[in-house]
């Protein structure tokens, strides 16, 4: 496993970015700029990452290609194509996005999230993005979410089969698919199932945790790794058993103290 994660602050200078990554003790990193950055910044970051054995784990393509607004969807698809081209250029493990929402909130729930028509649209959009770039060094991956496809290993496999592209992969965030008390109280089995069924397709993983409160009805919140229910020993063992170079990226930490706590906890394993 290559541990990496967020860095507070913005970095457009490759040397300063590398210094920040090294200062956190990371062996993997989010790529710090998008496709609109100057070429020398893009290539400089990629060159330093390779020189110092820092794996570029992800290029984010966070947007909503499924938007009901045609112009928003068009712009999102174009952005995903550009970001996938960037991931290919710098040799990232993956370019990652969620499938997208049929509603106004780009990452939110919608009544049509699990319909047959939505599945077909996700397949077509994903194929369009991959076929435009035809990547050979990276993959276009979808991060699983609690209220949209794919929301678990079975629906990911259905999607993988339907997309039928070698460059299509999985992004695993265990916290995102704990959407019921059953999954919450048995994360060990859920994690093992994900790696058993999705293992060959997993390109990158996210690290955060989840906690369920007594508030009715079911109420789940993200939290710092170690404060919630996720079995991190099993999670890390499964990553290492699959490929010791798969990145585990800490994200969504609100403060530097939270980030430090998360990294300290994960490094115990």
Image (spheres, rainbow, N blue to C red):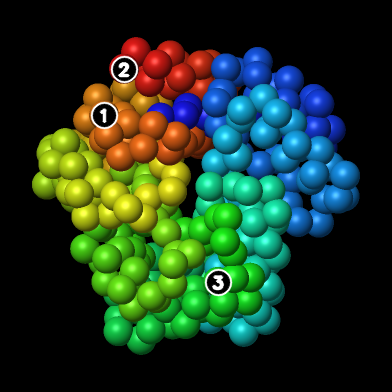
Residue designated by label 2: 269
Q: CA distance from mark 1 to mark 2?
A: 9 Å
Q: CA distance from mark 3 to mark 1?
A: 31 Å
Residue at the location (74% across, 31% down)?
48
Residue at the location (43% across, 14% down)?
264
Residue 213 on image: x %, y %: 23, 35
**Disc with the residue nearer the chain's start (1 vs 2):** 1
Residue situated in front as seen by the camera: 121 or 216 = 121
- What label does residue 130 carry, if any? 3
Q: With respect to residue 25, does 197 lie above or below?
A: below
Q: Secondary structure at mark 2?
A: loop
Verify CB contact (< 8 Å) between mark 1 and mark 2.
yes
Q: Quadrant of the C terminus?
A: top left
Q: Mark yes or no: residue 129 visible.
A: no
Q: Secondary structure at mark 1?
A: helix
Q: CA distance from mark 2 to mark 3?
A: 36 Å
Q: Is residue 261 left or right of residue 61?
A: left
**Disc with the residue nearer the chain's start (3 vs 1):** 3
Residue situated in front as seen by the camera: 51 or 80 = 51
Q: Quadrant of the N terminus?
A: top left
Quadrant in the rendering for residue 129:
bottom right
Quadrant in the rendering for residue 136:
bottom right
**Disc with the residue nearer the chain's start (2 vs 3):** 3
Residue at the location (57% across, 17% down)?
25
């Amino acid at each position: 496993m290559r541990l990496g994660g967020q860095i507070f602050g913005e970095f457009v200078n490759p040397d300063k970015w590398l210094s920040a990554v090294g200062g956190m003790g990371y062996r993997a990193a989010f790529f710090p700029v998008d496709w609109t950055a100057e070429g020398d910044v893009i290539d400089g970051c990629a060159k330093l990452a390779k020189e110092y054995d820092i794996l570029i784990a992800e290029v984010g393509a966070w947007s909503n290609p499924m938007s009901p607004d045609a112009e928003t969807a068009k712009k999102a698809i174009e952005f995903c194509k550009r970001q996938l081209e960037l991931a290919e250029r710098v040799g990232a493990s993956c370019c990652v996005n969620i499938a997208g929402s049929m509603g106004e909130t780009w990452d939110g729930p919608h009544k049509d999230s699990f319909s047959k028509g939505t599945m077909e649209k996700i397949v077509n959009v994903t194929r369009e993005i991959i076929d435009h770039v035809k990547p050979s060094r990276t993959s276009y991956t979808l991060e699983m979410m609690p209220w949209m496809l794919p929301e678990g290993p079975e629906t990911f496999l259905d999607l993988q089969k339907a997309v039928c592209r070698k460059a299509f992969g999985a992004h695993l965030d265990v916290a995102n698919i704990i959407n019921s008390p059953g999954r919450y109280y048995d994360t060990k089995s859920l994690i093992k199932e994900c790696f058993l069924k999705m293992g060959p397709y997993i390109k990158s993983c996210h690290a955060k945790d989840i906690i369920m409160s007594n508030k009715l009805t079911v109420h789940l919140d993200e939290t710092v790794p170690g404060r919630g229910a996720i079995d991190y020993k099993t999670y890390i063992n499964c990553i290492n058993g699959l490929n010791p170079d798969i990145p585990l990226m800490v994200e969504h930490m609100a403060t530097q103290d939270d980030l430090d706590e998360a990294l300290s906890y994960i490094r115990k394993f």
